[in-house]
Every structure is written in C-alpha cells, then in structure tokens.
Image (tube, coloured by chain):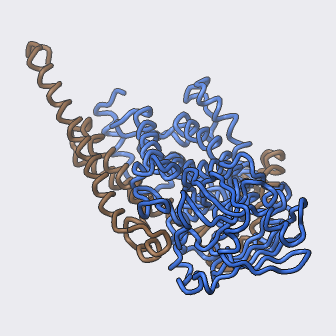
C-alpha cells in the first residue's frame, strides 16, 4: 500500500512483445476494416462486446436467478425448466432474423422458399423441448414415489 | 459443502460488499472456476482454428488475385500472402470446407457464450491493471471479445440474408477475422499452457495463481447443477444447433435442418427442384431476354467473336458431369447431373485450341455483386467444367440459369454464373 499510486510495474517483457505483435497485425487489418463506414464498424465491434457483457448476460443471469428463487426448496427441479428454456432461447437468438420474420420478403424472393415456416417450427421445437422435459420430470416423480413406497418410512 | 448458520451470518455481513460487480463476492455461481473455463477454452482453441483456416480457404476459393471482379477486398495487402490457384479436385472441396466453416461456426455459438459467461467477473477486476503487460492484455481482450462476437454475428446474419451490418459482408468478415485472429493467437499463447494444466487437474484451487483464482466465487450459492452438468447443457445446445443445421448440406437430410435457411424443403419438385441461391425474379431476369429469339451467347477470344443461339450450342458436342452447388452461406446440394458444352470447347471456338486460358463471364443480370466473374485457366481446362444447358435430364429452369449457366467443380456457388450472356477468353 506504500507504493506510489501511478507507478505501474512493467510485467513480463515477453508478454508485452507478443501483444505488440498482435496489435500490429490487428492494426494492419483494422485500418482496412474501418476504411468504409468506420463509425458503424467500430460501433458494431465495441457494441457487440458491450451489449453481450452488459445487457444479454445480466438479463439471462437475472432470469436464471429468478427461476432458482421461484423453485424455492425444490432446487433439484430447476434443470427441468432451465434446459428447455435455454435451448429454445438459444435457437431464437441464432435464427432471430428468420423466426421474427424481418427478412421474409428478401428470403422468399431470393431462395424461392417460404419464410413463414420458421416461427411455427421454432414454436414446435420449443414445445418438444418442454414436453420432453415434462416427461422426464414425471418419470422421475414416479421413480421417487415407487422408491418411497418400497422403503420403510424410518429411512427418511 | 457444509452450510450452516455461520455462512448465513457471513452473507448478511457481506451484503453491502456485493452490490457492485467490482466486488468478488458479487459473483455467486459455484460453476465458475479454472476447470470450467479451461475446458471451454480448449474446445474454442481447436474450433476457432478450424473456422479461421476454412475461412481463409473460402477466401482463396474466389481466386481474388485473378481479376478485380472476383476481389471484394482490393486493399488486402499482405493478408493475401497465401493465395493459390483454387483446384477443381476433389469436386466437393468447397462444399466440404464451407460446410464445415458455417456448420461448425453455428455449433460453437453455445461454447462461445458459455466461455464469455465463465470469465465475465474478470471484466470487473480491480485494479484495472496490475502491470503494463496486464493493461495491454486487457486492451487485447476487447479485440478478442468484440472481434469474436463481430465475426459470429456478421456470419450468422449473412447466412440469413439479413444485411444490416455496416458495409459489404466480404470485407467486414475478412478484415474482422484478421483483427480477431491477431488477438486470438496472443490469447491462446498466453493461456493455453495454463488451460491444459487445469484440465489435466494437476492443481487444486489453492495452488492457482492470482489471475485464475478470481474466477472462483468466494461465497458461492449452493449448486443447482454440477460443472459436468453445465458442460452437458452447453454440449446439448451445440448438438441441437448442429443437428438442426447440418442437413442443409445434404439433399437426403435437408428435412432435418428445421431452422437452417436452406433446410426443410426443396423449392419445387422435378429435375430443377434443388436449392436456389438467387431466383430469376430476384435477379431481375425477364422471360423475354431468355427467349430463343432474343438470347445470344457472345464468345470472344484470340480469333475474334462468335454469337451463338441456344440451338447453335446444342449442335456442339455435349458432355455430362455430376457436380454440387455449394454456397458461401454454408448450404449445398448433392451432386446434380449437368449437361452442356465444355468450357474448353468454347475456348477452342475462339482460337484457344488445346491451351484454354482464363475466362471472364458476364451474366444478363444488371446488378448484384457477382453478375460478372472470372475463372482461372485450370478451371476452364477441367473436362467437367461446363456451360450447362440441362440439369437432371431436363432444360435448365429459369431459377437455375436458363438459357445457359456455368458449372465448375469445387468452385463457390456464385462463380457458377447463371443466365450467361458473354464469355471473354484470354489471360486476365
């Protein structure tokens, strides 16, 4: 704590050399990357990191925390909701332009395929995921009940 | 883990401290730790290396050094150092490399998201830098995370034809890849040895260096899933994306690619019922300009220029070849049965008998980035390279390039020019 406030130690010179090489290459390509709409590209580049770290991640972390809280003492049941929700939202995140219908006109005109099917299919996949999870949950309940019946109550 | 009243007291005591993400106790997931991060990191090390190599191959497949019309990145400088003449063998080469590039990229998305989740507490580490080297590393991490997300986002949007990014896809994805890769290599060199040690389990948490210990929550919540279970969820997400995407590379499996852009159904039945990149209507090709009376193919070369009607072309020797359509967007068709005039026979018509040169192909299309394309001499010389007039035993359909289209083994889809109007043979 006695260290003067602004004296930053140098650290590993090898690491500095490696990072300098990395910045040189990134700078060489970056000049061309920013040659067109530099502001737009920089916004996307930095914005992608900020949007992920400060919006998307806190949102799904908060949703997960709310789920765990709602489960109360049944923490072991959380996965039966968490897994289908996560997988369904993952598909929505990746295929959002097609599912949301924002590229319908261009997609249909370019490929000759119908674009209406994506939202319906996503809902169907989501239904299968939750349905499968519900079946697994019921099977587990049945197994637990059977195990409880077979054992004398003193075990618990 | 033993939890009792003591930990409850500690939690109440620590509540003020954990209000901001800058306090280590703010992060409560019991999953975070060097083993979890290292496993994901090693998967990404292999996966992203394959993505980079297949991306560079796709870039070379366009033969950007052959002609300005093939080159969407004229200012690439030394970044094109490795370019080579794209071969025509095996004929499924581009189908494989680009199918791997796009399918693997989509499959890795859950791994990337989980990796970023596992290290997010480090974003808020205080002090911001322990040394000059550490400060530089953190700047490099902005290029790594921003660059990685930029590449995945532009790629995922492009395959869905959602051109909202700020510029043309080719330069953005290409230069972005080099910026990302520069940071990726530095990160891999700095972290891989430690990640390998962590995965081999040679060190307990107490022996971890300071930089790694911050991943472990000092006051974790009770677990709702084991680390292996969490990895299973990540792997399950990857498997789900893979299973619903890979089918768009095989005609027989296309039904299984339920959410992929070229999955599900073929556009129509019959011999022309296979995947279309851009329809005639989209490209603005009218029936009148394709008609027997109006359409003429102009072939120019060493010995002058010839004009050929479709009937003239039918009188030339016709040959067949079984070749796929493989798109930069990662989808492809199985081999289709094309029939038409060999490109090298057309070259011979205009004075290149036995020594086929490069060719510059122009379409009836009036707009579009690939309405003109150049093919290299090795592609023209291949006996399977055709100016196709028929596919699967019938006349080409308008959407597949009627009256005539180019089809070349192993070439990216857009270099197989449709609705060909003019071919100029000669060294480009």
Q: Nearer the viewer, residue B65 or B271?
A: B271
Image-based side of B355 in relation to A65, left or right: right
Q: Which chain is brown?
A: A
Q: Residue at x 29, y 57 (%)?
A: A123
Q: Nearer the viewer, residue A24 or A41?
A: A41
Palette colour of chain B: blue
Q: Residue at x 60, y 60 (%)?
A: B327
Q: Position of residue B388 (x, y in %)?
A: 65, 64
Image-based side of B413 in relation to B392, left or right: right
Q: Nearer the viewer, residue B337 or A75?
A: B337
Q: Residue at x 45, y 70 (%)?
A: A112
Image-based side of B343 in relation to A70, left or right: right
Q: Is residue A53 above or below residue B30?
A: below
Q: Nearer the viewer, residue B223 or A130?
A: A130
Q: Say whether residue A18 is visible.
A: yes
Q: Position of residue A4 (x, y in %)?
A: 73, 55
Q: Is residue B376 above or below residue B202?
A: below
Q: Residue at x 62, y 60 (%)?
A: B328
User: Residue B339 appears in which quarter of the rendering?
Assistant: bottom right
Q: Position of residue B276 (x, y in %)?
A: 52, 65
Image-based side of B410 in relation to B424, left or right: left
User: Residue B268 appears in which quarter of the rendering?
Assistant: bottom left
Q: Say whether residue B140 is visible.
A: no
Q: Quadrant of the C terminus of chain A?
A: top left
Q: Position of residue B266 (x, y in %)?
A: 43, 59
């Amino acid at each position: 704590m006695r260290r003067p406030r602004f004296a930053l130690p140098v650290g590993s010179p090898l690491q500095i050399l490696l990072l300098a090489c990395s910045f040189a290459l990134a700078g060489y390509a970056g000049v061309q990357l920013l040659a067109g709409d530099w502001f737009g590209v920089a916004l996307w580049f930095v914005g992608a990191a900020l949007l992920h770290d400060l919006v998307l991640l806190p949102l799904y972390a908060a949703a997960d925390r709310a789920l765990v809280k709602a489960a109360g003492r049944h923490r072991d049941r959380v996965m039966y909701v968490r897994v289908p929700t996560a997988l369904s939202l993952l598909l929505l995140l990746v295929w959002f332009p097609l599912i949301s219908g924002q590229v319908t006109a261009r997609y249909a005109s370019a490929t000759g395929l119908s674009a209406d099917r994506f939202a319906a299919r996503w809902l169907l996949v989501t239904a299968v995921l939750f349905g499968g999870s519900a079946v697994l949950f019921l099977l587990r309940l049945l197994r637990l009940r059977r195990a409880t019946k077979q054992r004398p109550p003193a075990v618990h | 883990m033993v939890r009792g009243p003591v930990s409850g007291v500690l939690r109440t005591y620590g509540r003020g401290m954990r209000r901001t993400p800058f306090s280590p106790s703010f992060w409560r997931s019991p999953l975070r730790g060097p083993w979890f991060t290292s496993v994901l990191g090693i998967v990404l090390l292999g996966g992203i290396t394959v993505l980079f190599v297949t991306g560079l191959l796709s870039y070379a497949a366009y033969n950007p050094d052959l002609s300005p019309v093939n080159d969407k990145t004229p200012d690439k400088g030394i970044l094109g150092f490795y370019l080579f003449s794209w071969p025509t063998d095996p004929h499924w080469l581009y189908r494989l490399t680009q199918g791997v590039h796009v399918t693997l990229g989509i499959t890795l998305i859950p791994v990337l998201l989980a990796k970023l989740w596992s290290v997010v507490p480090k974003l808020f580490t205080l002090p911001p830098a322990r040394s000059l080297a550490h400060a530089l590393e953190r700047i490099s991490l902005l290029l790594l995370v921003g660059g990685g997300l930029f590449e995945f986002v532009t790629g995922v949007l492009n395959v869905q034809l959602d051109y909202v990014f700020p510029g043309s896809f080719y330069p953005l994805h290409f230069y972005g890849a080099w910026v990302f890769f520069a940071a990726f290599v530095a990160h891999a060199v700095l972290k891989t040895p430690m990640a390998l040690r962590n995965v081999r389990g040679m060190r307990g948490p107490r022996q971890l260096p300071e930089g790694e210990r911050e991943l472990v929550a000092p006051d974790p919540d009770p677990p709702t899933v084991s680390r292996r279970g969490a990895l299973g969820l990540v792997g399950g997400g990857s498997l789900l994306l893979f299973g619903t995407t890979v089918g768009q590379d095989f005609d027989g499996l296309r039904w299984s690619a339920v959410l992929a852009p070229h999955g599900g159904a073929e556009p129509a039945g019959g011999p022309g019922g296979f995947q279309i990149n851009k329809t005639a209507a989209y490209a603005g090709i009218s029936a009148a300009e394709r008609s027997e009376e109006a359409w003429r193919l102009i072939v120019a070369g060493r010995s002058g220029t010839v004009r050929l009607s479709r009937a003239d072309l039918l009188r030339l020797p016709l040959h067949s070849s079984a070749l796929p359509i493989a798109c930069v967007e990662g989808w492809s068709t199985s081999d289709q049965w094309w029939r038409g005039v060999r490109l090298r026979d057309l070259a011979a018509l205009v004075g290149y008998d036995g020594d086929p040169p490069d060719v510059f192909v122009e379409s009836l299309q009036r707009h579009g980035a690939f309405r003109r394309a150049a093919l290299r001499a090795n592609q023209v010389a291949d006996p399977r390279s055709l100016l196709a007039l028929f596919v699967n035993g019938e006349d080409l359909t308008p959407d597949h390039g009627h009256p005539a289209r180019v089809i070349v083994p192993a070439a990216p889809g857009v270099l197989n020019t449709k609705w060909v109007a003019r071919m100029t043979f000669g060294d480009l």
